[in-house]
Image: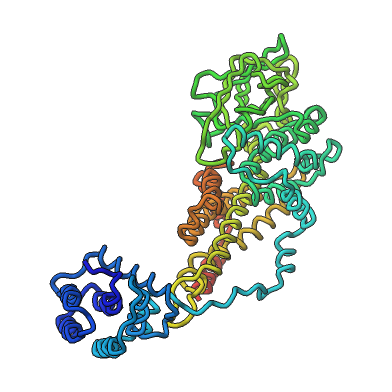
Amino acid sequence: MLDTSSPHVRAVLPLLYVAWADGVLVPSEADTIRRQIRAQDWIDASTREEICGHLDPQSPPTPTQYFRWIRALKEGAAQTSVTTRCSLAELGVSIAAGGSDGAALPEPSRRALEDIEAALNIDGEEVLSDLLGERPEPEPPAVEAPFEVDALTALLDGTHADLRERVRTLLQDPVFAYRPDLDTPAYREQVLHWCERLAEQGLGGLGYPEEHGGDGDMGKFITVFETLAYHDLSLVIKFGVQFGLFGGSIHRLGTENHHEAYLEPAASLELPGCFAMTEWGHGSNVRELETTARYDPAAEEFVINTPHDEARKEWIGNAAAHGRMATVFAQLHTDGEEHGVHAFLVPIRTEDGTPMPRVRIEDCGEKMGLNGVDNGRLWFDKVRIPRENLLDRYGRVAPDGSYDSPIPSPGKRFFTMLSTLVGGRISVARAGLSAAKSGLTIAVRYGNRRRQFGPKDEPEVPLLDYRTHKRRLLPRLATTYALHFALDDLTTRFAATGRDASLDTIEAEANALKAYATWHTTDTLQEAREACGGQGYRADNRIGRLKADTDVFTTFEGDNTVLMLQVAKGLLSDFRREFRDMNLLGMARFVADGMATRVTELN
């Protein structure tokens, strides 16, 4: 093995490195170098033969040997003033002078090394640039954006810009600082504490009527929800469960007596609550839920019961640790008849956190993400609640057990009740999109600063200058902008819709955009992770956490595939109605318009 500390060996080491750089030494090159080496009487005979022994085309150096040569060259170069503008001969002479004995080589040695380099027709500068990794310093990234940042920010912030800024300012308070070291129980308590701070600011009840401590503006509530998603998604979901689902169900499914009793305690978090719809045996198929609510006219009470284990309430946010009351969806039985799914307010814990009698609660445990949310399971063993705890906006039970509803059709009544979930779907879509924006912000900024490869003797090129990298991120960025404005428009129309108005059109759009936006989020965060390379895999760069926390967004508040099937069914029904009323000329015009649109899109 060559002694790389020998000045004679170090002198010819650059030439050996180049000779074997591509792993193949052709015989003519080997003969040229051997002949020149053996003619150098300034190298002692044994070292000459040892060097020539490493010039056998049939016996290349091992990877370990070659790595040691490279390391010796780099270490030697670091101790000299050599640059990429030097020749290989100059590099050899310079690092030989820095060898173990510090001896300088005789002047003929430089000329001999230059002759070998010339005979091999080597571009020494190019070799040294690759070996030493030296490139010109790149220009610092531009700090001035080529557009008006303030104008774009104002456009994106929209109608409720002041509210967004207020929330962003709140999130900068040290109270909201990240604590990545927390275990799950402590993380849940932190998220609860954050929700309490937001409730103190009056942000929880923004969507409730003014006479009950709110602002009467669902647009403002959704704005807060979306903005919180830039910070912590467990906070967003707990905020949504408490103020959007639990409080929102009381607001939209209850009547004045429920509003008077419960909305302000819900808005202040004095009464932590749950939204208990999903069952182990029935998730998307809400109509077939099996929890029952049988009315007892003698006691004027409903008896809430879980008939078997698969009818337990599952994945209920706020249930495992903090919730004290739940909006429970159950099949209503009264006066010998079943009237379908209705919502009931059921206490599940006392004020000190003890489960109520005949209520069984379990923790769903660790999840892929959102571990700051205490998801739990609920069973009810013939739990009795007052008749008044039925949220009776769409169906009332009189003391004698007789049933009355302003919507006679059970099917229409059921879907009208479910339409109260529209706000949740819009909110989830916007929160998911916030996560996509965060991931894209990280990936685009990284791509603008991270440099790889480049032309010879030029600075390395930012990743974002490569067309392939642009195609990974910029189309998704454009889609994110488009979804932002689509959801903003939908939110505005939803917020302007009266409590008693039909939500059919808005519900169809909410279903479509919720599915499309959350699928887009899942895809975008994966691409953002890959676009950041290994850095994207680091926990402290957030993308992994964003991916884990948003993965379930494609499932809750409506499974995306089921939602898209509903959208498709609605569109087909609309087409059928249009064609039914259309004459031959109208059909021809419809086909022509469709073809014109298609041609325009292709061009």
Residue at the image position 51 percent from the left and 31 percent from the top: 282
Extreme residue toward the right, this view: 211
Q: Position of residue 34 (x, y in %)?
A: 17, 82
Q: Position of residue 137 (x, y in %)?
A: 53, 77
Residue 111 sits in quarter: bottom left
Asked if 4 appears above or below 279 in the picture, the reply is: below
Image mark count: 0
Asked if 557 appears above or below 518 in the picture, the reply is: above
Residue 470 visible? The answer is no
Residue at the image position 48 percent from the left and 68 percent from the top: 469
Q: Position of residue 262 (x, y in %)?
A: 78, 29
> Which of these two is toward me, 357 or 555?
357
Extreme residue toward the left, this view: 58
> Which of these two is toward me, 3 or 585?
3
Q: Position of residue 509 (x, y in %)?
A: 62, 52
> Which of these two is toward me, 497 or 10?
10
- Residue 263 lies left or right of residue 133; in this view the side is right
- Residue 483 lies left or right of residue 467; in this view the side is right
